[in-house]
Image: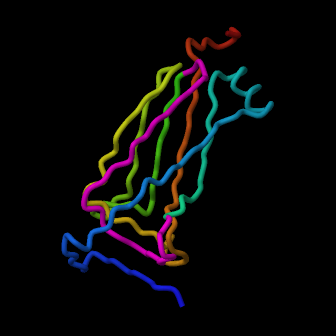
Amino acid sequence: MGSSLLFTRRDSLQPKQLVTVPPIDLNYQLQMDAGAAAQFEALGKFSKHVSNYAIFQTTNKERIKNYRIRQGSFNVNVVSEFNHNATLVFYYPTITKNGVPLMDTMIFTAPGTISKVITLDGYDVDLSDGGISYNVIPYLFEINLVRKSFKAGINQ
């Protein structure tokens, strides 16, 4: 039988009991199919919603349901080869502070790379996906791509 850890808001961990969480990589590569490319050509805009899970890796197969982040951050890097502007909305429904889920928006002016640090100090992380799992972080993001210098009726 594997070991199981459960940290809740009521836990009072001594500093020597704090755990360093390794980086969790979330990578997504956006590609447009022929229909989406035609829509983008005609309307000058394209939206994509993505929903997935990040796996919280543990060393000894611990099943962690939740924890509080004393100090930490997400380092978000967006690289685009699209020559168009975008708005990116990141939503983490199970990473909360005072009951409010973490959400962040980035405005991207193409082409190039943008980076942002999202501070997570004091956030609670529910790794149970609402009590049905463990060691997972559900996330959603939305990409709204807008053609640079779009004018209706003119192909650019």
The residue sitting at the bottom extreme is 1
Highlighted range, magenta: 57-84
In the rendered image, residue 144 lying in the magenta stretch gets the answer: no
Q: Nearer the viewer, residue 58 or 66?
A: 58
Reply above or below: 73 against 69. above
Which part of the image, by quadrant, shows the N terminus? Answer: bottom right
Does 58 sit left or right of 119 as displayed? right
Residue at 30% over, 53% down? 72
Q: Residue at the spot x=48%, y=75% of the render?
A: 60
Magenta residue check for 59: yes
Eyeballing the image, is 89 above or below 134?
A: above
Q: Position of residue 123 (x, y in %)?
A: 30, 60
Depth check: 61 or 144 in front? 61
Residue at 33% over, 77% down: 7
Where residue 153 appears, x then y in whole percent?
69, 11
Q: Residue 45: horizontal and vertical position, in percent?
A: 62, 26
Q: Residue at x 51, y 55 (%)?
A: 139
Quadrant containing the C terminus is: top right
Q: Nearer the viewer, residue 66 or 32?
A: 66
